[in-house]
């Protein structure tokens, strides 16, 4: 939440120098203003490039948390989990991290942003369809 996408390459380099070639990067959103996490979709490809094509995943439900500066627990924007996940999958991510719970209203942690478990299967089917579509496209270099 505090490191720019371009700086992630330095972190990956340190892992690789230590002998670990199996690194996965995860974006969870960045603090923007007070108590709000925002995801920069352009950052996904930057992280992939600076890391030497390490897989990049997206923690969608964490990015939907809203901090309550006066409360003991964070709030969330569960209603937007599908639209944010669709946007992430449309840029060709390696995967998603999703918190799901049988009864999010009674979850001990992150319930307001968790996906109801009953919605997980249709959610995953949509994400897989988007993933298949996007990864079926030929790479289009628009830099030249």
Image (cartoon, helix red, strand yellow):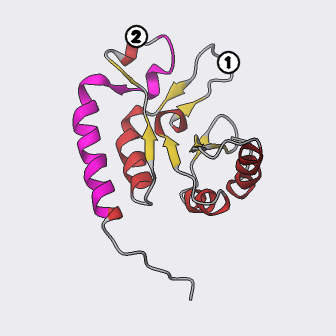
Residue 34 position within the rendered picture, expressed as x and y whole percent measured from the top left: 69, 37
Q: Residue at x 30, y 66 (%)?
A: 136
Q: How many numbered discs, if any? A: 2
Residue 97 position within the rendered picture, expressed as x and y whole percent measured from the top left: 46, 36
Q: Residue at x 60, y 40 (%)?
A: 37
The image shows residue 98, relative to residue 8, as above or below, that is: above
> Which of these two is toward me, 8 or 39?
8
Q: Give the mark nearest the N terminus, 2 or 1.
A: 1
> Which of these two is toward me, 132 or 77?
132
Which residue, given by chain and number where applicable, does mark 2 sit on? 106
Q: Which mark is residue 70?
A: 1
Residue span colored magenta? 108-133
Quarter-of-image position of residue 7: bottom right
Query: Extreme front residue here?
Result: 19
Q: Residue at x 67, y 54 (%)?
A: 5
The answer for how far apart the CA atoms under marks 2 and 1 are is 20 Å
Instruction: Point out the image quarter for the N terminus.
Output: top right
Quarter-of-image position of residue 9: bottom right
Specify the principal SS of the magenta part. helix
- Marks 2/1 in contact by CB < 8 Å: the verdict is no
Instruction: Point out the image quarter for the C terminus.
Output: bottom right
Give the class, few, some or many, for how many residues have Cα within 10 Å of label 1's Cα (few <14, many ≥20): few
SS class, disc 2: helix
> Which of these two is toward me, 51 or 5?
51
Q: Which mark is residue 5?
A: none
SS class, disc 1: loop
The image shows residue 44, relative to residue 70, as above or below, that is: below
């Amino acid at each position: 939440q505090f490191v720019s996408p371009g700086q992630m390459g330095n972190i990956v380099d340190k892992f690789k120098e230590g002998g670990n070639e199996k690194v996965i990067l995860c974006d969870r959103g960045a603090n923007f203003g007070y108590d709000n996490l925002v995801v920069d979709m352009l950052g996904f490809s930057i992280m992939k490039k600076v890391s030497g094509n390490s897989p990049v995943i997206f923690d969608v439900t964490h990015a939907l948390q809203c901090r309550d500066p006066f409360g003991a627990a964070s709030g969330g924007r569960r209603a937007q989990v599908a639209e944010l996940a669709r946007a992430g999958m449309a840029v060709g991510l390696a995967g998603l991290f999703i918190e799901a719970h049988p009864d999010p209203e009674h979850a001990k942690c992150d319930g307001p942003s968790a996906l109801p478990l009953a919605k997980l299967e249709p959610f995953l089917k949509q994400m897989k369809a988007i993933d298949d579509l996007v990864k079926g496209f030929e790479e289009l270099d628009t830099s030249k």
